[in-house]
Amino acid sequence: MNQNFLALGLEEVIVQAVDQLGFEKPSPVQEKCIPIVLNEDTDLVALAQTGTGKTASFGLPLIQKIDNDNRKTQALVLAPTRELCIQITADLKDFACFKKTNVVAVYGGASITDQAKKLKKGAQVIVATPGRLQDMINRRLVDLSHIDYLVLDEADEMLNMGFQDAIDEILETASEDRNTWLYSATMPKTVAKIASNYMKDPVEVTCGTKNQAASTVDHEYYLIDNRDRYRTLRRIVDSYPGIYAIIFCRTRAETQNVAERLMADGYNTGGLHGDMSQGQRDGVMKQFKTKNITILVATDVASRGIDVDDISHVIHYQLPDDNEVYTHRSGRTGRAGKTGTSIALVGGRDKYKLVQIEKTIKCRMERKMVPSGEEVMKAMVFQSMENLINAQVHPKALKPFTEAIHELSEQMTVTEVLEKFIALNSSKILNFYKDAKDLNASGKSGRDKKSRDSQRIFINIGEKDGFDWATLKDLLREKTSLTNDDFGGVDVKGAFSFFNVSKSKVEGVFEAFEGFSVGDRKVSLELTKTFKSPDRRGGGRDRRRGGRRDSSRDRRGSSGSRNRSGSRSRRERRK
């Protein structure tokens, strides 16, 4: 029997389950937390990164403390997402396999009637998401007035997802004599407020430094031009042929777009975002866990609760606005003692975020250069060679072809065979990268070039029409054939907005919005300076008021026009 876990104070019946699960030794958070909650009736705040064994650190002692002769609800575990709720439930049932403790999962997206029936049969431990549990409390289907233990798992994520009101209501209805154990990867003010308001002199356990990134994760970034974001992503993915990764995007539309582009380019990819049904999300996650999908493109909210230990890379397609979200993202790799890499694609304007993230995770991020086409081709060739070396050969199956193989070997040298094998196996990727350009941004000069190549445009919709910078970019993408990365400098005001787009694409943007309305208002675009269409000879066409030339303004000359070259629109000067 495992002496390492027995030494923590766990009973033999619990350690039997530990042995069956193959645990060899406790993780740091388990070593620190298990003896505390077993030996003391105390509240606990535990700060540790995702993937460090937090579930076992509260789950093993919790199962030991449950009185199996008492069928009433004795413990509640709150988790931020359906996926994590299901995973914790499965883990607790494994820990209780020799005790037969009744653990019931309560979460949205499933029949509330079926869950209520399971609770009536006697749920000694409830694992729940805040929203569904709040609903069941209001329907008087759940009684928490006599529970002994309440666990808040991934507390910071629950608050980031907007569950503050639900958590407050749940904590206020739960027994005042309970012990509360709070687990979190970071300690923002909102989490500290819960500890202050609802916990009594909690013992604090910290594995590593508060908000610090996991030591098993390497943090890297690539400084790029925004227009090369997707091409850079492909180049990074191709330079790691065995990659098993999550790519994080900020919006649902961007997630779907990147996933579709990767699939079209031949990658085993799936998307995960809030516009998908629960069944679709479950299907994608099942394929990802079985590695039928090796690259998962996800939003932050949809990805919460992912429990996969051998993810090799996390790629931040866009840096998050909240620094602590970066910590959660990167915590999806380097789990269970394994190493991983967190890669950020950083546009010139995002460099300030980099500094803030480094302060938050207390770790210096290493700048990497985007691999050249030649470097990617070498990586692909070495992978092909490794696959060849490791290929399983069954002599009996090849016996009928032995003579033909020997005849062929007499016609070519070993080197020729390998060259032809590589050419056949990697011809598509080799041709794609044959004349690949350098994608590394050069800093200030790159920004200057971008400024010269872009055009600023006024659009007569803004906050009062329900838009912010993200939803306006989504509208621009949906109305044109461009991606979110093609639009920059988005500035949304009350009744109007501004954005930048490449000069070569301005004509298409105006054409896409001709005749388009938001509500009862016709949408119109204006340039902040004259734009001459490349499709017309001579003086060109001044794109004002949805594309119509105002001849009276043209006759007045530059002093009568607000959009002449070198001047700004009145609307922009008012900002």
Image (tube, rainbow, N blue to C red):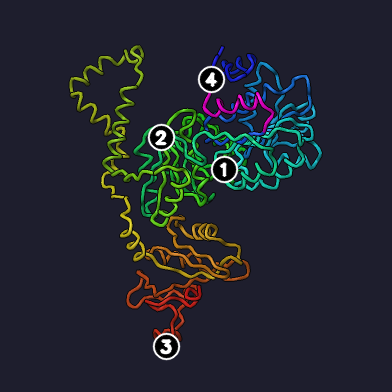
Up/down of 42 relative to 235, above or below:
above
Q: Quadrant of residue 197?
A: top right
Magenta-highlighted residues: 20-42
Residue at which label 4 appears: 23
* Nearer mark to the viewer, of 4 and 2: 4
Give the secondary structure at mark 1: loop
Up/down of 133 relative to 547, above or below:
above
Instruction: Report, in whole angstroms, how far the alpha carbon at label 1 lies from the one at label 4.
Output: 29 Å
Q: Which residue is painted at 71% across and 28% down in the image? A: 125
Of helix, strand and loop, which mostly describes the magenta segment?
A: helix
Q: Which residue is painted at 38% across and 56% down in the image? A: 348
* Residue 411 at x, y percent in the picture: 18, 23
Along the line of sight, which residue is nearer the eye, 539 or 362? 362
Residue at which label 3 appears: 556
Q: Is residue 302 visible?
A: yes
Label located before the other in sequence (1 or 4): 4
* Nearer mark to the viewer, of 2 and 3: 2
On residue 243, which mark appears?
A: 2
On residue 8, which mark appears?
A: none
Label located before the other in sequence (3 or 4): 4
Instruction: Report, in whole angstroms, how far the alpha carbon at label 4 lies from the one at label 2.
Output: 27 Å
Instruction: Report, in whole angstroms, how far the alpha carbon at label 3 lies from the one at label 4.
Output: 82 Å
Instruction: Report, in whole angstroms, how far the alpha carbon at label 2 lies from the one at label 1.
Output: 31 Å
- Tell whether position 383 is magenta: no
Instruction: Report, in whole angstroms, how far the alpha carbon at label 2 lies from the one at label 3.
Output: 62 Å
Residue at which label 1 appears: 187
* Three-letter amino acid code at the position of disc 4: Phe
Label pair 1/3, CB-CB below 8 angstroms: no
Q: How many marks?
A: 4
* Three-letter amino acid code at the position of disc 2: Ile
